[in-house]
Amino acid sequence: MNKNEKFNHDLKMALDIARHAPSSHNCQPWCVNVTDSVPNIDSIKTTQNSRFVTVSFDESRMLTSLPSLTGEMYTSCGIFTELLTQALVFKGYQCEEHWIDNEGIILILHLLPTETVSNHAFEQLQATTLMRFTNRGPYEQTKVDTREYESLIENLNTKAIHSQLINNPTLISSIANLIEDYAGLDFSNKKVWQETYSFIRFNDNETAEDGFYMRNLFGPVSWAFKQAFKFISHPKNHMLSKIVGLPNYMAKGLAELVDSTPQLIVFTAKNKSNSSYWHLGKDLSKVWQKAQIQGLSFHPLSVLLQNETPRKKLKNILGNKEETLFIARLGTAQSPATRAPRRQVASILN
Ligand SMILES: Cc1cc2nc3c(=O)[nH]c(=O)nc-3n(C[C@H](O)[C@H](O)[C@H](O)COP(=O)(O)O)c2cc1C
């Protein structure tokens, strides 16, 4: 294998890990290009062995039904990039990230081959990435203790992102009430629901590359439930779903789940800039993987942050000065989750 072939091979191996990154609606809004044309940035010190890779948005895959979803796109791509760079480091590359955030290009990775290859660490990363799932089912009542929590967040880049463990039952109940009042917004806003609905794969046997199967969202459900949900929740039947009270039913179900969760985890930053959401993704990638290793699951509750009113109310409940960028249920899941579909490497690498 010559140098170029080796680089392409290593990049594909690294992408094969990164492609399992979690993303909002599992939309996987990223794409990667190998490039020679590097912008004239002082901090980039090109050498003969330099290789450059851009991480960009795949605009056709981005969620756009609400302005607040842009932040989730940066977070998703931040998680993806963190996995990509970790994998490349273990494959023997020094990785420098150069933030671009212009014309869809989020950043440039400057890669330099080193002598330090760690196949064992690469395989471990591969295994933990494949082990990680979003678990939307009920969690055990076991509380995460201080030691476990500190170990979970030990790799946080504390300069940009801060985390908070919410285990006070009164606070959790207030947040559950907020869910009950506002989670219906996901279903009752036609544009938002149309976008979400387009990501639901109703046929379990359909090969998909993004979105979620019904089993990913609800666990094992009967054929009759699937058909009824598919029909009533169809955006064409928007009025019907309101008449039968689907938005309230879904919101109530999620609120009950939150209320019975022993703890929530919250991530905050000074502001809601693209860069903050991006840094959140980088940190979240490490925390979420660590959680999985510790036998803990995450279930994000982004609906609280997508609309201004619940976002402000949540900020008041938490008594935070900083902006909340992410909130999730955290705990030991009672049942395992199932794998959601993923894009292939060839679809990500241009
Ligand atoms: C920024 C972000 C926001 C998310 N928000 C939600 C959410 O509000 N509700 C939810 O059930 N899952 C949420 N998820 C989880 C994704 O739906 C999940 O990662 C994706 O479907 C892939 O499934 P997996 O995590 O099991 O691999 C979110 C994930 C990310 C990265």
Image (tube, grey):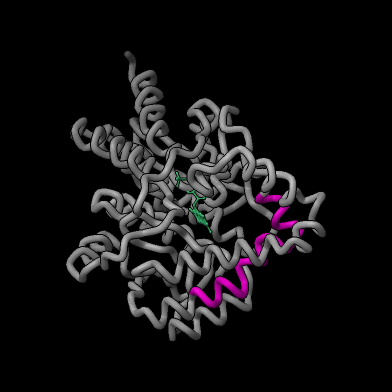
Q: Residue at x 65, y 67 (%)?
A: 248
Viewed as shown, does residue 18 lie left or right of 343? left
Say if residue 343 shows up in the picture. yes
Label tally = 0
Position of 215 relative to 328 (above/below): above
Q: Main SS of the magenta segment?
A: helix
Q: Which residues are magenta?
A: 176-196
Position of 103 relative to 2 (above/below): below
- Between 1 and 348, which is closer to the camera in this rendering? 348
Position of 91 relative to 320 (above/below): above
Q: Residue at x 53, y 48 (%)?
A: 217
Viewed as shown, does residue 156 lie left or right of 193? left
- Between 85 and 193, which is closer to the camera in this rendering? 193
Viewed as shown, does residue 75 lie left or right of 44? right
Q: Is residue 177 magenta?
A: yes
Q: Residue at x 78, y 63 (%)?
A: 243
* Residue 259 x/y as whole percent: 44, 71
Q: Quadrant of the C terminus?
A: top right
* Residue 20 x/y as whole percent: 43, 39
* Residue 205 x/y as whole percent: 57, 27
Q: Is residue 71 magenta?
A: no
The image quarter in which residue 260 lies: bottom left
